[in-house]
Amino acid sequence: MARSFKIAQWTMIAAIAFSGAEACAQVAAAQAPDAANKDAQAQMKGLAPRSSPGDYQAQAKAGAITIGAEFTAHAVSTPEGIYSTEDYVVVEVAFFGAEDMPLRLAQNDFSLKINGKQVPAEPYARSFGSLKDPEWEPPASASKAGKTSLGGSGQDLNAPPPAPPKMPFELKRAMQQRVQKAALPEGDRAMPVAGLIFFPYRGKADGIRSVELSYEGAAGKATITLHP
């Protein structure tokens, strides 16, 4: 009888322990999506707005909203580094207003007048074709492979020069993802919010005489002179 009682006690203890472990597993499973969502939100967090509109090169009002803007020419500034694009010029913009009043943003809200010629904004991904990291250098072996002696035997002097080494796919992809996160987000956004806008321009930066950013969107209209 005593033995049966002890067996029943151990059975009850094991059942309680199993139930506790199962409950912990359920809690962990419930918390996992929240942790994953937080990680995803952290990864998608883009370019942080500066402290105030006055921290930008120029400012303008559009209704109750204040816009700060800075022209960076062919430089693409992200929190992780500064890249460059020969085919586009970039404007960093930020919107400041009431935090409880979301603002709808769209790339089509912007255009840029360069030397008197108006050009519309284009998707950030179109800059990827000419996007470069000025700090990236090819491995020494690749650099040596591209150099040959003009006096070498058997060399075809009429052959075209070898193609420059390409950035590894992993590094290129990481660079593109950083630019994607730094681009101005679209849709309904809480303020303050900031990001980069891309405009096609293949000329040299020193040939730019005047730059004027135009905004026409949900907040109203604004024109910001960025150069001179």
Image (cartoon, grey):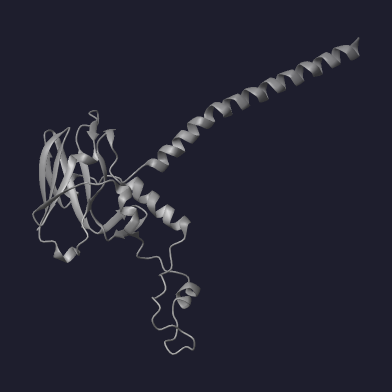
Q: Position of residue 218 (x, y in %)?
A: 17, 32
Residue at position x 44%, y 38% from top? 40
Q: Position of residue 53 (x, y in %)?
A: 17, 45
Relative height, residue 219 to residue 172 (above, below): above
Q: Position of residue 191 (x, y in %)?
A: 25, 36
Q: Would residue 116 be found to the left or right of residue 8 on screen?
A: left
Q: Nearer the viewer, residue 42 or 155?
A: 155
Q: Position of residue 204 (x, y in %)?
A: 20, 65
Q: On the image, which quarter does residue 206 sit in?
A: bottom left
Relative height, residue 20 to residue 93 (above, below): above
Query: Could you tell me which quadrant the C terminus lies in?
Result: bottom left
Q: Nearer the viewer, residue 194 or 187?
A: 187
Q: Would residue 74 be found to the left or right of residue 19 on screen?
A: left
Residue at position x 45%, y 82% from top? 148
Residue at position x 30%, y 60% from top? 84
Q: Nearer the viewer, residue 190 or 151?
A: 151
Q: Would residue 66 be found to the left or right of residue 30 on screen?
A: left
Q: On the image, which quarter does residue 211 sit in?
A: bottom left
Residue at position x 35%, y 47% from top? 180
